[in-house]
Image (cartoon, rainbow, N blue to C red):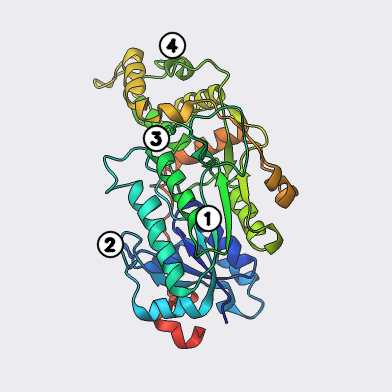
Amino acid sequence: MRKFYLLTGATGMLGGYLLRDGLLSGDQMAVLVRDHRRAAAAQRVADLLAPYESMLADADNGDADARRPVVLPCDLAQDDLALDSRSIDWIANHCHSIVHNAASLQFHGADRRGEPWQTNVDGTRRILNLCRTTGIHRMHYVSTAYVCGLRSGRILEDELDVGQTLGNDYERSKLESEQMVRDASVLESLTVYRPAIIVGDSKTFETTGYHGFYAILKLAHTLVSRVELGATSGGELASILGLDRAESKHLVPVDWVSSVITHIRANPQFHGRTYHLTAGRPTLVSEMASVIQEAVERYSQLASCNDPRRLDGDWITNAFREQMSVYQSYWRDDPEFDQQNTQWAAGHLPCPMVDRDLLMQMARWAITSRFGRAVQPILRQPETHRVNLLMCNLEVQG
């Protein structure tokens, strides 16, 4: 009997929440995860779930295996996904739907042989081939709100390619990938989720991804280590970036994005549509820039007045402007995203407002954790059976 959801991108920022929330909801989950030089696929998933052990244990209700994922080592960069025939047969016999969440967030690629094309386009093509081979006909696909490119005005959820100009290779690759899954004859049901800019957890402020807002925060954090306190005050970041203070961005907490996707995925009456997972009220870019400036002045280590390597405010202004060029499209004003489908399906799950206070808490967590490097390492779990590695559990699972 096919009762499993097959998830890609489980070790990413959103993917970890999708896996956790799926398991807590009682769903049977299988994950495609790449072996890493530091840890095998099963260990990576065990480490991912370790912070949630108590939550999962409370939800076990006497059936621990029901709250553990089956782990299938794979590689999206390989034509056959590095899956052997035994794994493919297991998927064909046990998985009814796929949640394709794996993506590269790289803004620019030298050519189509590398990222973001390799994961977002070629990887999606290989996932569709797996669906054909295994008879999976239902997909939940995580796209991005920014397939709209440089459009302005109101963006409808059922619009995709209307001849818009794209701002970077990430947007180009995701537009191509979304069009690919829409055109795939193998899929009888396709549900598309388009989140905006995903930031940390709205309750714990934690994050495991450092793109977008966090990449800019990290750049500022690195640069201010060369200047004294007060050296940045003469060059306000909003002015350095050439902002007119009217631009705004849709920032959405990762826990909210996951809760909406999990809710829609669990209710078939909502399938087959496209959902903008965007903010009810966007955040002013000038406020984001102000938070970044204040956060690094509060929480980052600045140079002392006796440090011979210290530099002046002009240096940080010029260095920041130069290195920010790659993120220029990030600061552009967001259009108005229609949310009719999202309100219909998940209106009871309002998006937390990412205001100045919440953004400052997220910035503080990122800086004080040294952008993830200071987070306590997870001890290797002796109970590795709590993650069902497929090759060890075929008979048990099937």
- Residue at the (35%, 79%) spot, across then down: 85
The earlier-in-sequence mark between 4 and 1 is 1
How crowded pointer 3 is (Cα within 10 Å; few <14, some 14-19, many 20+) is rated as many
Q: Nearer the viewer, residue 365 or 148?
A: 148
Asked which quadrant contains residue 157, the reply is top right
* Residue 350, percent from left and from top: 71, 44
In the picture shown, does residue 17 fall above or below 27?
above
- Tell me the kind of residue under disc 1: Tyr
x, y percentage for residue 168? 39, 35
> Front-most of 356 and 229?
356
Q: CA distance from mark 4 to mark 1?
A: 45 Å
Look at label 4 and name its amino acid.
Gly
Which mark, by number, is residue 234?
A: 4
Q: Secondary structure at mark 2?
A: loop
**Residue at image x 32%, y 68%?**
80
Mark pair 2, 3: CA separation: 31 Å
* Disc 2 versus disc 3: nearer the observer: 3
Residue type of the residue flagged with mark 2: Arg
Instruction: Name the disc covering residue 141, or none.
Output: 1
Q: Is residue 71 visible?
A: yes
Of circles 4 and 2, which is in front?
2
Left or right: residue 309 compared with residue 171: left
The residue most toward the bottom is 395
Q: Quadrant of the N terminus?
A: bottom right
Measured along the vertical axis of the image, is residue 354 above or below residue 206? above
Q: Residues within 10 Å of mark 4 (few under 14, many from 20)?
A: few
Q: Which mark is residue 37?
A: 2
Are discs 4 and 2 less than 8 Å apart at CB?
no
